[in-house]
Amino acid sequence: MKRFFILMLSASLLVSCSEYQKALKSEDSGLKYAQAEKKYNDGKYNKAIRLFEQMAPNYKGKPQAEKMFYMFAQSYYKTEQYILAGYQFETFAASYPRSEKAEEALYLSAKSYANTSARYTLDQVDTDKAIDKLQAFIDKYPDSEYLKEANETMKVLREKLEKKAYEIAYGYNKISDYKSAIVAFDNFIADYPGTPFREKALYYRFDSSYRLAVNSVPSKMEERLNQAKGAYNNLLKFYPNSEYKKEADEMLAKIDTDLKQFAK
């Protein structure tokens, strides 16, 4: 009996493979569709994709095109081919704006782009694109069932951009390029006023100003020391109990000592 079932299963698999291969080689769009849908429903998305890719160029306008293109996009998404999935879902939403799947497709398009976002140490072009796509989705569907998840994803992506921008500014400080660090920290603070890195940014902005001042030529030192003192005041204005207060106070004492020579 066990041998019988094994033989039956083997035969079934052979028939299934034969039908799939036949569909791949066939010019019959109905046969291709039937096999593609079967592979999709069976979770064999890569096999379904091969058929969808054959069908897609000439399938627009046909009765089952909407369902086919939705399955096509989902197959890319299920196999984590997110760039292709993002494009297919976006195209679906644009081609079938009245579809009951249009909202979901536009969200999954944005989510696909979000899934291509690299870690913060790498280029963030895809992160910017994902944020734009998510914002476009939120603007179009402000009451969507996906709104909470979309906002949470946006938050993660924006924090990644914040960390990237902060690390760039901090990197200038570490390599002693204090002028660039000051500009980068100023831009960071202006661009991300609610960032969790704000306190650190204000401190290292002050640190950069202090180190630029004490390493300046005499003709520029007084002005830069006073600018550094302003950066100290800005840090303590927002964070009077800053975790960096001890270090900041020590630098301020040195600034005041150095300024005395210009008061004579």
Image (cartoon, rainbow, N blue to C red):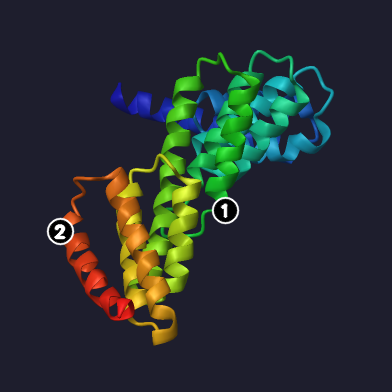
Q: Position of residue 225 (x, y in %)?
A: 35, 71
Q: Position of residue 157 (x, y in %)?
A: 46, 42
Q: Would residue 258 be seen by someone viewing this image from the given angle?
A: yes
Which quadrant holds residue 208? bottom left
Q: Is residue 89 above or below residue 103?
A: below
Residue at 22% of width from left, 67% of height from top? 251
> Circle 1 is placed at which residue position?
125
Question: Which amino acid does the dot numbered 2 rest on?
Answer: Lys
Residue at 59% of width from left, 32% of height from top? 135
Q: Quadrant of the C terminus?
A: bottom left
Q: Position of residue 85 (x, y in %)?
A: 60, 38
Q: 182 or 36, which lies in front?
A: 182
Which quadrant holds residue 69? top right
26 with respect to 239 (left or right): right
For the residue carrying disc 2, how many other residues have a C-alpha within 10 Å: few (<14), some (14-19), or many (20+)? few
Q: Are marks 1 and 2 in contact (CB under 8 Å)?
A: no
Residue at 80% of width from left, 35% of height from top? 27
How far apart are labels 1 and 2 at the CA level? 39 Å
Q: Nearer the viewer, mark 1 or mark 2?
A: 2
Residue 246: image tag: 2
Residue 227: image tag: none
Q: Earlier in the sequence, mark 1 or mark 2?
A: 1
Which quadrant holds residue 131? top right
Under tag 2, what secondary structure? helix
Q: 198 or 28, which lies in front?
A: 198
Looking at this rendering, what residue extends furthest in the bottom direction? 217
Under tag 1, what secondary structure? helix
Q: Quadrant of the N terminus?
A: top left
